[in-house]
Amino acid sequence: MFKTLLGTAALALALTATSALAEIKIGSIVELSGAGAASGTNFRDGVHMAFEEINAAGGILGEQVAITEYDSQTDPQVSRAMVQKAIDDGVYAITGTVFSSSTIVNMLVAQQAGIPQFTGSEAPKITQMNNPYIFRTAFGSQKGIPKMTKYMAEEMGIKKVAVVWANTEFGKGGHSAFLDEIGNFGIEIVADIPTEQAQTDFSADVLKAKNSGADAVFVYVTEEESARFLREAQKQSIGLPLIGETTLIGAKVIELAGDAANGAMGHVGLTAAADIPAVQEMVTKFTEKFKYTPDHNAIKGYTAAYAIKCVTEKNGKVDSQALADAMHGLTLTAAECPGVLMDVSWDENGEMSRESFFVEVKDGKQTIKAILPPN
Amino acid sequence: MAELLQIIISGLAAGSIYALAAVGFTLLWQASQTINFAQGEFVMLPAFFVLVGLGFGLPLWAAILLGLGASLLILGVAFKKLIVEPMLPHGTLPLVIATIALGLLMKESVKELYGATAQPFPAIFPQTVYNVFGASVSVQDICNLVVSMLAIGGLQLFLSRTRTGRCMQASAQNPAVAEILGVDVKRMVMYTFLINAALATIASVLISPIYLAKFSNGETLGLVAFIAAIVGGFNQIRGALVGGLLIGVIDNLSAVYISAEYRSAMPMILLIAIILLRPQGLLGTKEGRTV
């Protein structure tokens, strides 16, 4: 009798343990403080919203998704420790980090553990390290910058340019991709101005760019620094087109820079202004839920979550290795996986490819000047 | 020439705000031997008080007054009563460590309560820009410079020309004798803390439209203000003023003419040079202490 009771109790315990384990753990490791907080918070909220929708619709393969959150503090070493912690906690996949300097360091930990990682980083190096577990949620600057440089040369007729860039892994990646590309279009660099992460005073940098004799300034720094740069540029009446990537003209930058953001232009992989119903719907839901306008990082996080869902369901099992294997050379169309919002492909290195946009900020809003085809 | 003029104006505008924070350093040191390593956070925090006021729908001027009131209460009275007074009898070092802890607490509290991302802060002065000898001079820069100079000039006049100011100086120079002469030393020290809180509020309101309000703003500001105070002379208000302005201009000059990459090293190099060549600071006076 006692043995039977004990057996029943053990079985009940085992079942409880199984049902507790029967949820899919996702590790969200992003910059919730430090210089990358603006980007990280957007990315995190995008991931959260998507998985809440997924859970409400029955989860993935009938299992609910549990997100465990870790703050990288925008510090590469902390981010590395957090990725290790997430792996120790038994996550199925990792979303984040956004800052390239962190991703470059922490992706090796996820690689060793064989856990697929969906990063918001854009430094070219990330997909050039033969890591089969890293996947982008927006294409790297080596894909975005050629599109933008072509537009600058052919549509805007720019011959001489001043480059203001962040002296970080992210900035170096964009800087060297830009340097590689301008030769093809006969653009000359007349001022090369590195800046520091979390820099607050941009008066000297704006002055150098302004007096360099450039036709335009290419600004490649992260969001908060972009806002400070734009404010200073307005203060010094720079009088030159300011062109950048997503980080110059994102929603957070527009909020922080105010009027000073008007006139800034740039290339974005994803934009809330895109005339695509699925994107508009996502933006409306996000704005209602979090009370702020999402930027491209929120859309990155959102699409990462849906990519995990769709590919896992395609595989028919929750298996990290199978997820990573299936991602390579994959194309997800918005028709088969609406959550990815636009048709998207990943190559053998985890690099992604998709249509993108060239936008200008007018009256505090991104307006699309041109749609650039995938490359 | 236009470029140099531009650099000097931008440098003086930034430097004048560093000077406000640096003056606060020297005041607290003179009045109570407090080296306040939370000074940067003292400059960061009032901007958030103002933002809270704005969040309640107050007009900007009223939100600034609210910010000033909250700063006087928290950064002035509460800081003195809850941190400095209990810690000071244990010596300078425990107090220094307490202020470092306070700085961390303030930073993390703002991050927790208000958020980790930078917040836009409304400009107090018009964004108009004038062309002067080829340099773009913004009204904001000039106003920042003028307000900071008026605040520091007013403080100097208050300390040297009023009875209360002279009592404060006497308390700072020799508290025992001042007390014998009937000066309420405790009250004078409290005034010093209140003045420091007011200066921090002015610096915060001036700098936040440019730097944006962010919980981590104090890290750089505190360091720069500390260096400015040492370079100028830790025991002289005019020394802190000169130190602040000098660092503002040197930072911009080095970023344009030497190297943008090494600009943040320049104040450190200046600090090392001053410690080696003139330890009392540019305008400071030598002080002897028994150990």
Image (cartoon, coloured by chain):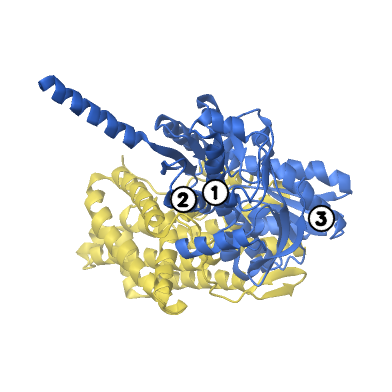
Chain colours: A blue, B yellow
Mark 3, other Cα within 10 Å: few <14 / some 14–19 / many ≥20: some
Give the residue number, with chain letter if any, for mark 1: A301
Q: Quadrant of the N terminus of chain B?
A: bottom right
Give the residue number, with chain letter if any, for mark 3: A151
Q: Please state the chain letter of the residue tagged with numbered disc 1 in the rendered image.
A: A
Residue B205 shows in this picture: yes
Give the residue number, with chain letter if any, for mark 2: A48
Q: Nearer the viewer, residue B110 or A129?
A: A129
| Left or right: A337 as drawn, with respect to A72 | right
| Left or right: A375 as drawn, with respect to B64 | right
| Mark nearer the N terminus (2 vs 1) | 2
Secondary structure type for disc 2: helix
Q: List x then y, in percent, for residue A216.
A: 79, 59
Q: Nearer the viewer, residue B23 or A171?
A: A171
| Left or right: B135 as drawn, with respect to A225 | right
Q: List x then y, in percent, for residue B58.
A: 41, 78
Mark 1, other Cα within 10 Å: few <14 / some 14–19 / many ≥20: many
Q: Is residue A300 above or below residue A311?
A: below
Same subunit, tags 2 and 1: yes
